[in-house]
Amino acid sequence: MILGAKSAKVSISDLCVDGNAVQRVNVFKLLGVLLDDNLEWNYHVDAACTKASSCLHFLKILKLSSPSACDLFYFRL
C-alpha cells in the first residue's frame, strides 16, 4: 500500500525488498487497526462491529444455559 497525498499518486509497478516482490494491498492491519489506502475507518469499524456482534450472540446463547455453565465459562477465561 502506498500512503500519501492524493495529488502525489505514484505508479510503482514492481516494488522489491531484498529481492522479494512486495504484494500490493488496499487494506492491512497495523497495531490492531485496519488501514485502507484512503485512510478511512470503514473497514476497521465493520470488523469491530462484526466481532462485537459475534460476542453478543455467544453471550445470548450462554445466558440460556445453566448458571453453572456460565460460571465455568467465566472462571475459565
Image: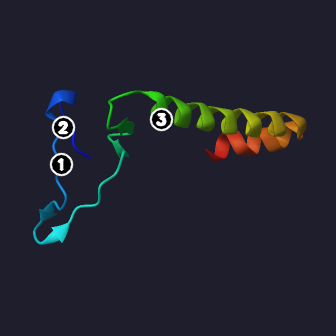
Number of residues whose C-alpha sits closer than 10 Å to that of mark 2, classed few (under 14), some (14–19) or many (20 or more): few
> Is the residue 18 above or below the residue 36 in the image?
below
Asked whether the beta carbons under mark 1 and mark 3 sit within 8 Å of each other, the answer is no
Quickly name the residue at label 1: 11
In which quadrant of the rendered view does residue 10 lie?
A: top left
Q: CA distance from mark 3 to mark 2?
A: 22 Å
Which numbered mark, 3 or 2, is in the foreground of this view?
Answer: 2
**CA neighbours of label 3 inside 10 A, class few (<14), some (14 to 19), many (20+):** some
Q: What residue type is disc 2 on?
A: Lys
* Label 1: how many Cα within 10 Å (few below 14, some 14–19, many 20+): few
Name the disc covering residue 28, or none: none
Q: Secondary structure at mark 2?
A: loop
Contact, CB < 8 Å: mark 3 with mark 2? no
Above or below, comparing residue 16 to residue 37 in the picture: below
How did the renderer colour the structure?
rainbow
Quarter where residue 68 is shown: top right
- For the image, the number of numbered tags is 3
Q: Which residue is mark 3?
A: 43
Most foreground residue, 77 or 42: 42
Q: Horizontal and vertical percent for residue 4?
A: 18, 33
Q: Position of residue 35 (x, y in %)?
A: 35, 37
State the residue in front, 50 or 2.
2
**In the rendered structure, which amino acid carries the disc numbered 1?**
Ser
* Mark before the other along the chain sequence, 3 or 2: 2
Residue positioned 59% across, 31% down in the render: 49
The percent position of residue 28, horizontal first and vertical second, equals: 36, 46
Q: CA distance from mark 1 to mark 2?
A: 7 Å
**Label at residue 9:** 2
Judge left or right: residue 60 versus residue 43: right
